Amino acid sequence: MALAMAYAIAYARKASSQLQRFIVYLLLSMMNSMLIGPLFYYMFKISIVRAAEVSAFAMMIEVIPFLGKFLSDVMNERSGSKTFLYIYTGIFVILDEIIMSLDFNLISGLQNSLNLYSVIYSLSSYWFVFPMAFEMFLSAFLLRKDINKFMIIVFSVQAAVMLLMPVIFSGFWVPVSIYLSGAIMTGFFIYMFEHLYRKQSISSSSGRYIIWLLTGYSLMMGSIFLWQYNGSLILISISMIIYMSIYLNGILRYSFNDKKFFWIANRRWSLIYMIMVFVSEFFMGATFDAQYYGATPFISSMNLAAVSGTFYNIMASSLYDFIAFFGITALSTWFLIMMGIEMGSLVVFRLKSAHPENRIRLILMLCAYAIYSVLIPSFIIPNNSKIPFIGWSMGIGSGGPVAPDLIIPIVLTYVISGLLSFFFGSRQMCSVFCTAPVMYQGTFYDSMKKFNRSGKISKSITLSNRSGKLIYRIISLMVYSSIGMAAVISFLDSIHVTSLYIYGTDPEYMLYIFYFGVLWYLVFITMPVLGSYACINTGYCHWGNFNRFISRFGFFRLKVKDPSACLTCKTKDCATACPVGNHEMPGSFIKNGYYKDSRCIGIGDCLEACPNDNIFFYDVRQYLRKKITKNENLDATK
């Protein structure tokens, strides 16, 4: 039956004549009627003869209207529209699968009645999932010559995810299916990012389908997370119907070989794509955490507020719960592991072509993400609030409240990080230790820096003009004021002078969750609007602001071997390559022989873009080398 439906799907896409369309109607109607008879037999305890009569009657009722339409089209020489064929095929494929699942569940004794629950249960049983996944695999294979390679991979991944639904079996299947499907989707995201980066264009229908697919996958992963928490199958059943409908709509209707568009020039598509990728990743990370820690303990650790009482209380507690759930999930161990694998792979793709010193920085960045951001705080020293620099990785608030016994670790954190920024520049944080550079500097995401100069908002934020500086000052002032006030309240709470908590959560820690678990990701996924590295250019990251401020008085700067080469340079590629928007570099190189600015975080794209290989990093290492060798003309080549 599944094999026949896969052929029907492939045949419906290729059908060009009235006869071919009628064959599709006939095939799907025949399968539907064959499945209705057994359903009546088991539900109403009728005889086999009556069941056969029910099937025959259903066949007649379903086929006669389409036979009449077929004869009318032939006699009047009308070609007819294929829209109805596609809708009919999609509805009947899903309907036949539902009835077939009900039949086999009744035959096998998994169900003994027909009601809403039995229909929901049938949609989450292996009698529905396995045949549906098989149809997806086979129909994509049958149409492989009509669809481009990229979309065949997309359809195959979609079928694999359907096959690995965790609800169809219990026991070991649940964790295996969750982790394996997550691994497949992570690998697919990596493939998709790299494909878009290298091709720079995608067909219009492929672009639309990718957005719909990510929407369906987000719904599916969200429903799985809810099932992990309360065992509800309703949303899973609905999401699978939507997921399959997306597949059928795409494989039947879309050409995937139509006009292409450059995604980097399409701000709207890129923004929607970034949002839907993140939503998919978010719920995928949530399911990982729920599986590893247990859904109930994971939710309980968020200290969510009860949504009840007056309208004001309902709105306030709902907002708090959203920030807490969103932020804690986005900062959780398994979410960071998944994002590290995904984004880190894109960074690895850059290593081969990277400048030698930039290659070292990228490797250090990956190691710092794995060790400093994931391994140490989550697996080696989970209770690390009293450990400077590690326990307070993003400054005040990231380790908890401002309690008296934590003052020294907090101060030492700022001292350690400040010294590193003084010696090596703020790149030690913004380009190495922070999780942000791993996500910004992979091949696909790095190419999005082109949005810095292509939009009104991104230009005003990225470029060092009057409006950009004003935005930076206002936002950074607001951030520091909020953190300062929250720190005072947190300290007073800790010494029992006041008791001002946000639904039982320390206000400073709550700000950390909001700034780095919520706002940072909102800034990241809106790169097509705000531009690359808006966390730096808007000034909202107080930890980055601190390190960049210290860097202004330190050793780090960009230097050139020959300022005259910059004078005759026709491209000024160093300025256009900078993802932070340091467009003043060429003029400073010509005038001073170096460039020093708090926004320069040593990403190194300017080194790679320079056509004369003229730029190099200067920090405490070169300073000490000069002092030791007493060579004032020592440069990066020696």
Image: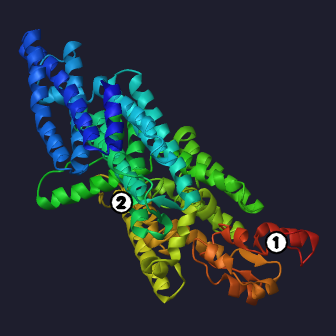
Taking 51 as reference, is 621 above or below it?
below
Please give left or right for residue 336 compared with residue 502 in the image.
Answer: right
- Residue 434's spot in the image, x, y percent? 57, 58
Q: Can you give x and y, in whole percent of width and height, for residue 172 in the image?
A: 41, 22
Q: Nearer the viewer, mark 1 or mark 2?
A: 1
Q: Residue at x 69, y 52 (%)?
A: 363
Q: Position of residue 618 (x, y in %)?
A: 76, 72
Which of the two residues, 74 or 89, is positioned nearer the viewer here? 74
Q: Quadrant of the C terminus?
A: bottom right
Does residue 350 lie above or below 225 as drawn? below
Secondary structure at badge 2 equals helix
Q: Residue at x 34, y 43 (%)?
A: 13
Looking at the picture, which amino acid does disc 2 mark? Pro
Q: Left or right: 157 with respect to 125?
A: right
x and y percent of residue 439 in the render?
54, 57
Residue appearing at x 50%, y 72% in the figure? 451
Going by the numbered disc 1, the residue's amino acid type is Tyr
Q: Is residue 243 left or right of residue 415?
A: left
Q: Looking at the image, is 607 positioned above or below residue 569?
A: above
Checking the image for residue 623, the label placed there is 1
**Tag shown at residue 504:** none
In terms of image quadrants, where is residue 137?
Answer: top left
The quarter of the picture where residue 32 lies is top left
Return the mark for residue 507. Answer: 2
Residue 495 visible in the current orientation: no
Tell me how far mark 1 sits from mark 2, CA to CA: 43 Å
